[in-house]
Image (cartoon, rainbow, N blue to C red):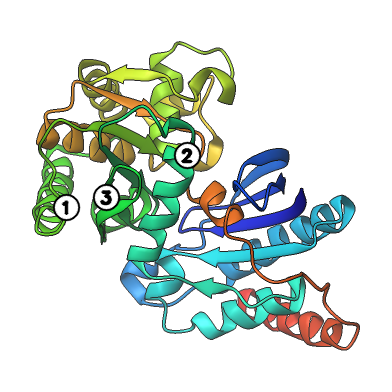
């Protein structure tokens, strides 16, 4: 077994997995799995740039993760960044900051690469059951659609996500009917775009990934606290998803925050995320969604990078200067 670490940095959250990996099979044994809401994609849809405060939050999480990786003695580290950093004009600031903290070059992957990693992580445990899967990974800035059986046969990434839709359209709490209609129009257009590459109809198992989907599942299961074991491979019906999405969209911030399984970092964007999932299920005709806690992070860990080296001492001053510059911009 080889000890590996994988980091997935998305629009809303940054997540770490440290695991022992079997080089022959790619099987993973989790040692540490954690998530931090950093909202790296704050205002990217509007400004085209990563905000200084968003970079500072992300670098703080990277610093914490560096200590965890060191404590576990991982010999491989792969850092993958997705939608927000793809879209940002100043992504070089993000890349240099991550490199200084973690000693690796972050890979700003394409939507198609993101889709393939998500498919690998989500379906590995389901392999051998036969049939095809439609994997849907609802992120903060983008949503990936992947169809395949033993491997990927078609994939498409589209620019809808819970953060992007919320920042683009929602100005009231709860959102107005006009704001909900605007979000639905964006979702429908994105589904039309995805359907040009990925067949959205047909007899396939729908597998849903990421925080919006797992939160909806936790609500449907009536959990008193978030329980990844109970959520993983749960099956949530289209009727349940529709009811939950509707309730979230008419609830106030305080009402959503009071839901026991709701992460504070998802309170303001969960309505849009649930709406995307509901729209996908309507478009595909899926009667249920299989919810997976294993996703792009597991796919990244299954394809480790070369041996990891900690940041050298000469990199530390550069990191200090970079963070100081970010802090100065916030004053």
239 or 259: which is nearer to us?
Answer: 239
Q: Nearer the viewer, mark 1 or mark 2?
A: 2
- CB-based contact (under 8 Å), mark 1 and mark 3: yes
Which residue is denoted by mark 2 in the rendering? 124
The answer to whether 288 is drawn above or below residue 46 in the figure is above
Q: Pointer 2: residues within 10 angstroms few (<14), some, or many (20+)?
A: some
Q: Earlier in the sequence, mark 1 or mark 2?
A: 2
The answer to whether 116 is drawn above or below residue 43 in the figure is above
Secondary element type, mark 3 = strand
Secondary element type, mark 2 = helix
For the question of whether residue 87 can be seen, the reply is yes
* Quarter holding residue 272: top left
Residue 87 screen position, x and y as percent: 37, 74
For the C terminus, the image quarter is bottom right
Which residue is denoted by mark 1 in the rendering? 198
Instruction: State the CA–CA distance, disc 1 to disc 2.
Output: 20 Å
- CB-based contact (under 8 Å), mark 2 and mark 3: no
Which residue is denoted by mark 3 in the rendering? 145
């Amino acid at each position: 077994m080889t000890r590996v670490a994988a980091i997935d940095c998305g629009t809303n959250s940054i997540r770490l997995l440290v695991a022992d990996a079997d080089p022959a099979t790619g099987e993973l044994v989790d040692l540490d799995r954690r998530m931090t809401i950093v909202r790296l994609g704050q205002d990217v849809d509007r400004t085209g740039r990563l905000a200084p405060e968003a970079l500072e939050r992300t670098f703080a999480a990277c610093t914490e993760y560096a200590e965890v990786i060191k404590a576990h003695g991982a010999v491989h580290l792969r850092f993958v960044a997705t939608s927000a950093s793809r879209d940002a004009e100043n992504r070089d600031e993000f890349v240099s900051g991550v490199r200084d903290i973690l000693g690796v070059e972050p890979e700003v992957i394409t939507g198609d690469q993101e889709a393939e990693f998500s498919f690998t992580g989500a379906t590995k445990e389901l392999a051998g059951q036969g049939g095809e899967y439609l994997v849907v990974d609802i992120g903060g800035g983008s949503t990936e659609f992947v169809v395949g059986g033993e491997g990927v046969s078609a994939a498409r990434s589209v620019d809808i996500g819970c953060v992007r839709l919320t920042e683009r359209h929602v100005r009231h709490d709860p959102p107005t009917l006009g704001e909900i209609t605007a979000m639905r129009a964006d979702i429908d257009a994105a589904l039309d775009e995805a359907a040009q590459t990925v067949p959205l109809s047909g007899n396939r198992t729908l597998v849903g990934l990421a925080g919006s989907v797992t939160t909806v599942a936790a609500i449907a299961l009536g959990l008193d606290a978030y329980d990844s074991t109970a959520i993983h491979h749960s099956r949530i019906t289209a009727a349940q998803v529709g009811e939950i999405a509707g309730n979230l969209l008419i609830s106030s911030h305080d009402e959503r925050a009071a839901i026991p399984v709701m992460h504070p970092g998802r309170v303001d964007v969960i309505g849009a995320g649930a709406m995307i999932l509901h729209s996908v299920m309507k478009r595909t005709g899926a009667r249920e969604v299989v919810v997976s806690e294993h996703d792009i992070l597991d796919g990244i860990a299954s394809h480790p990078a070369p041996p990891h080296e900690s940041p050298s001492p000469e990199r530390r001053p550069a990191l200090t200067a970079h963070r100081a510059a970010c802090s100065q911009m916030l004053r």
